[in-house]
Each structure stands twice: as structure tokens, then as C-alpha cells.
């Protein structure tokens, strides 16, 4: 019964009732609502029929609220106010969403790339708010697929057919060791063979870094079968800092910014790169603000890479 009543009512009827009640006159209310007096009278009549009670007492000279009408008036005003609030709130949320860019990124990108990029972008689009959430490669792709992020920045995890991958940056895999390690002090360029027989700490299989060395020919056995594996950079830092162990990470993931006692040195023979890509959904329209931020990032790839020494980070347009 209640649902049927609600379906038959309209906001125009609520406004008509409130206006007549406030004005105390059909003619004044009709002028306020910009409708004819007969149309207003008909609207009030239909409203009272649906509600099922007499809300207004009419005489030839005035209109006043009945006792039930007096009880109903604040409720009708609240309904109109709630609808107005809901509409304004939704519009505000839509405006915020319009200018919000959500990005899922690898931790190394969240720390080393995106903060500076955001600072450079905001003067160009001060209304835009960029929200970033760090995750591993699998998680970045999942966030984009689920719509939790507008786009992601990661190395390719699964080559998912529902995602589009646009090359962005690449960073060279290099040695991570203590500053007092013999390889850190060596003046000549380092090769992977220099790591032979060293205690090596690898990243866990669920990380994108572990995939960079998998199946690569010419790497020492200690790299392919490490003494230990860790899931987090923090654990890797702790192990290397406390002993003679070494590891290898992409330049942007190098923890030398966390611990000055650790160093990063590039490795060759072979030269390995992690390829970072901008990941977007194929079957979902990209928000305009996100699309513009992506184009900005692509345009800034040379400037971003120039912040890192010895060409260890390169834009995709650079030669290998």
C-alpha cells in the first residue's frame, strides 16, 4: 500500500502543498510556482486524495492548514529538503569524481616516480586530485580490471587480453650491496659473472622482480637459485645490511634511498631492464582526467628518467 502511494506522488505536488501552506493563498502560491491557479488547485486536490486526508481548509477569502495539515507540513518540507540535499551531494560527488585520478602503482613507482610527476602536473591542472595505491604487479592489474584504479603503472604481469599496455619507462637491473662490499668499491664496470659464488638474496616468485632473471642465460647459479628469497624490500635491506649478502633490483627499486649504507651498481653481460608500462582497461572508457594525466606522464618520460644517474632509467624512446 505504501509503495503505491509513493508511486502516485510527485515532488511538484509536495512543492505545491508547501507553497500554498506558506503563502496562505492559492493565487500567491500560483504566482510563486509560475503555474495557473486552476492547475494548482487540481494538483492540491489530487495530492489530498492520494494522502487520504484534508490538509487545507478553504474559504472564499483564505486558505489555512487543518490540524493534520499542520502536522504534515514539516514532514513535507523535510522531504523536499532531503531531495535537494541528495541532489546537491550527488552533484558534488560527481564533480569530485570528475577531477579525481586513481592510479595503482608498484611501490618503487609510488616512491621514486609519481610524487615528482604529480607535483609537476598540479600547476597545469590544480583541480585534479591524484590518488595512488601501491601494489605488486598482480595487484596493479587486478585493481585496473576491477575498476578500483583508472590505470596502473607496472611491469606486465599476465598480458591480460582485457588490458592495454603502453610502454613508459625501463630501469636497469643492478647490484645491491653494502657500501663497504668489495664489489661496491671496484672501479671497473660490473658484470653478472662478478656475483658468482656470492650469497645472493632473491625476491619471492610473487614479485615482478623475480621474473626479470628467470630463464635468462649466462647468469650465475647463485642468482637463479638464491640462498634466500624475500617478499619485501624492507626484508631484503635488513639481510644485506647485516652481512655479506648481495641482491639485484631494478634501478627504481634500489633501496639506497632508504639506507645510505647500501649502493646500487649497474650490471652488464647481459644488460637486463624492467619494462614499466601504463596499464588501462580495454572495455571501459577512461575518465578524461585520467587520460590527460597519462598523456602528461608520457610527455614527461625523458624528464623523469633524467633524474636518475648513469642512464639506469630510460624513456621507452631511448636506444638500449
Image (cartoon, rainbow, N blue to C red):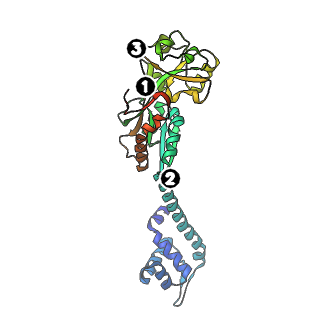
Please give the residue where the numbered disc 2 appears in the rendered image: 126
Q: Position of residue 186 (x, y in %)?
A: 54, 15
Please give the residue where the numbered disc 3 appears in the rendered image: 217
Please give the residue where the numbered disc 1 appears in the rendered image: 273
The residue that appears at 54% across and 23% down in the rendered structure is 264
Q: Element under label 2?
A: loop
Q: Position of residue 311 (x, y in %)?
A: 45, 28
Q: How far apart, in angstroms, are the residues tagged by discs 1 and 3?
A: 15 Å
Q: Residues within 10 Å of mark 2 (few under 14, many from 20)?
A: few
Q: Element under label 3?
A: loop
Frontmost residue, 281 versus 53: 281
> In the rendered view of the protein, which quadrant contains the C terminus?
top left
Does 276 sit above or below residue 51? above
Q: How far apart, in angstroms, are the residues tagged by discs 3 and 2?
A: 49 Å
> Mark 2 or 1 closer to N-term?
2
Q: Position of residue 48 (x, y in %)?
A: 49, 75
Frontmost residue, 122 versus 287: 122
Q: Answer left or right for 292 relative to 185.
A: left
> Mark 3 or 2 closer to N-term?
2
Q: Residues within 10 Å of mark 1 (few under 14, many from 20)?
A: many
Q: Is residue 194 visible?
A: yes
Amino acid at each position: 500500500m505504501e509503495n503505491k502511494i509513493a508511486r502516485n506522488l510527485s515532488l511538484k505536488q509536495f512543492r505545491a502543498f508547501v507553497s500554498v501552506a506558506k503563502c496562505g493563498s492559492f493565487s500567491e502560491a500560483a504566482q510563486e510556482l509560475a503555474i495557473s491557479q486552476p492547475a494548482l488547485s487540481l494538483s492540491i486536490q489530487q495530492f489530498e486524495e492520494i494522502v487520504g486526508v484534508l490538509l487545507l481548509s478553504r474559504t472564499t477569502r483564505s486558505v489555512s492548514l487543518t490540524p493534520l495539515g499542520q502536522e504534515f507540513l514539516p514532514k513535507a518540507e523535510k522531504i523536499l529538503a532531503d531531495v535537494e540535499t541528495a541532489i546537491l551531494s550527488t552533484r558534488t560527488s560527481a564533480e569530485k569524481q570528475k577531477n579525481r585520478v586513481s592510479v595503482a602503482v608498484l611501490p618503487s613507482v609510488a616512491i621514486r616516480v609519481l610524487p615528482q610527476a604529480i607535483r609537476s602536473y598540479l600547476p597545469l591542472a590544480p583541480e585534479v586530485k591524484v590518488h595512488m595505491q601501491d601494489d605488486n604487479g598482480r595487484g596493479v592489474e587486478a585493481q585496473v580490471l576491477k575498476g578500483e584504479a583508472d590505470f596502473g603503472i607496472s611491469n606486465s604481469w599476465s598480458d591480460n587480453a582485457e588490458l592495454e599496455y603502453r610502454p613508459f619507462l625501463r630501469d636497469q637491473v643492478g647490484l645491491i650491496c653494502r657500501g663497504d662490499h668489495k664489489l661496491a668499491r671496484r672501479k671497473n664496470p660490473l658484470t653478472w659473472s662478478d656475483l658468482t659464488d656470492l650469497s645472493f638474496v632473491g625476491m619471492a616468485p610473487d614479485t615482478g622482480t623475480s621474473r626479470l632473471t628467470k630463464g635468462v642465460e649466462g647468469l650465475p647459479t647463485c642468482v637463479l637459485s638464491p640462498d634466500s628469497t624475500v617478499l619485501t624490500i624492507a626484508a631484503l635491506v635488513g639481510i644485506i645490511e647485516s652481512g655479506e649478502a648481495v641482491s639485484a633490483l631494478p634501478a627504481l627499486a634500489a633501496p639506497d634511498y632508504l639506507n645510505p649504507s647500501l649502493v646500487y651498481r649497474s650490471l652488464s653481460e647481459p644488460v637486463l631492464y624492467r619494462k614499466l608500462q601504463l596499464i588501462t582497461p580495454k572495455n571501459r572508457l577512461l575518465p578524461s582526467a585520467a587520460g590527460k594525466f597519462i598523456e602528461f606522464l608520457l610527455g614527461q618520460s625523458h624528464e623523469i628518467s633524467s633524474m636518475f644517474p648513469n642512464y639506469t632509467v630510460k624513456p621507452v624512446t631511448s636506444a638500449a
